[in-house]
Image: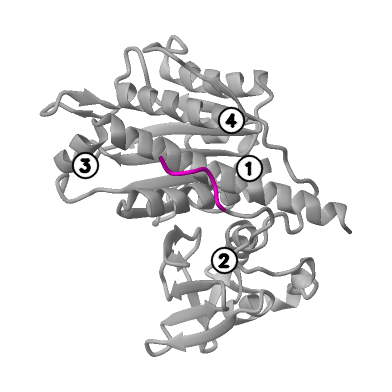
Amino acid sequence: MVGLGILAAGLWLGAVGGSALDAAPSPQSYVKLSGVEYLAGADYGARFGLKATLTDSGRKLTLKSAWTTIELGMDSRDCAINGLRVFLGDPIRSHQGTLHLSRLDAEKLLTPILLAGADEPAVPALRTIVIDPGHGGRDPGKENNRLRVNEKTLALDTALRLKKVLETAGYRVVMTRSADENLGPDKASDLLRRAEIAQQANADLFVSLHYNAVGSGAQRVTGVEVYSLTPQFQFSTSDPEHEDDQGAGEANRGNAYDHWNTVVGYQVHRRMIENLRASDRGLKRARWAVLRHAPCPAILIESGFLSNDTEARRITTAAYRQKIAVAIADGIQAYGNILAGARKQRAGK
């Protein structure tokens, strides 16, 4: 079995001190591009000791240090951080011969990954974790009828395995469901009940477990996706055309934890890709109900595609579901180590 997190407390990607943000951009540093505030990627990288290099005729920007490599592409929301696929909220834009990233991506995505706790008023605890197996009862979730498997059953089994691993590590774990059941008379109430359980448990982290499926190209699509809540004024990964104006304008309860949503999402996604050797579908953003209503930092995990027969057969094995559970626990423990490091750093000031 893979052991729990190997990160020492306080390890950040950029390995930068608390003074890294002393030279924060002034309002004059931002420019409006397509109605969105942007800043030069090179200027942002300099705050973290990241050297900027433009390649591909100015279409690719790499920010690099001894510890961190961030790769950004013009007009793309798909970037890479130390080789891990991460989706921005806004595309990279070219302005006056250099590439710019949006202010919200700098503040809500990159900075939490590079320097967890920066500009945050408090560092959360990590004692109680609520695990939410997706679907249940009359809602089977995704299905592979050829193999006679469904999401609700596999998600529950994975959740129970994750519960055991986390409890062994010393965490208090609460399940939203421990059997094949509905949590409400309809879908909306069922989803709201999951957030209510987290509230009643005084949860420090909410983790919703799912398995995915697609229609077209089912036998080609595989891999892991991890979602955190889309920040206010940005559009979800699945909305590149910016159609959900109403949703983007709303502030949801879960947005109070945007910073830590990103930190835990990145750490869990990182461990899953490394430990499972799965296809990297990306760290993404969405406004799923369980994320919108979460009373604490929260993520939703899609651990594989049941629509792909090869991957579905792998998921149906107990050994692979155990491996998924341990990978998620490794990511959660890494998040816990980062929280401990941030608290220690603040106590030393």
**Marked residue nearer the N-terminal end (3 or 4):** 4
Q: Marks 2/3: CA distance?
A: 42 Å
Residue 252: image location, x then y, percent: 62, 37
Towards the viewer: 255 or 109: 109
Reading the image, the residue beneath label 3 is 311
Taken as a whole, is the magenta stretch helix, strand or loop?
loop
Towards the viewer: 282 or 186: 282
Circle 2 SS class: loop
Total residue callouts: 4
The image quadrant of residue 322 is top left
The image quadrant of residue 274 is bottom left
Reading the image, the residue beneath label 2 is 35
Q: Say which amino acid is labelled 3.
A: Glu
> Which residue lies at the image location 42% right of the left edge and 32% below the top edge?
209
Towards the viewer: 45 or 26: 45
**Number of the label disc, if any, that sits on residue 272:** none
Q: Quadrant of the N terminus?
A: top left
Q: Quadrant of the C terminus?
A: bottom right
Reading the image, the residue beneath label 1 is 255
Circles 1 and 3, Cβ within 8 Å, touching? The answer is: no
Badge nearest the viewer, 2 or 4: 4
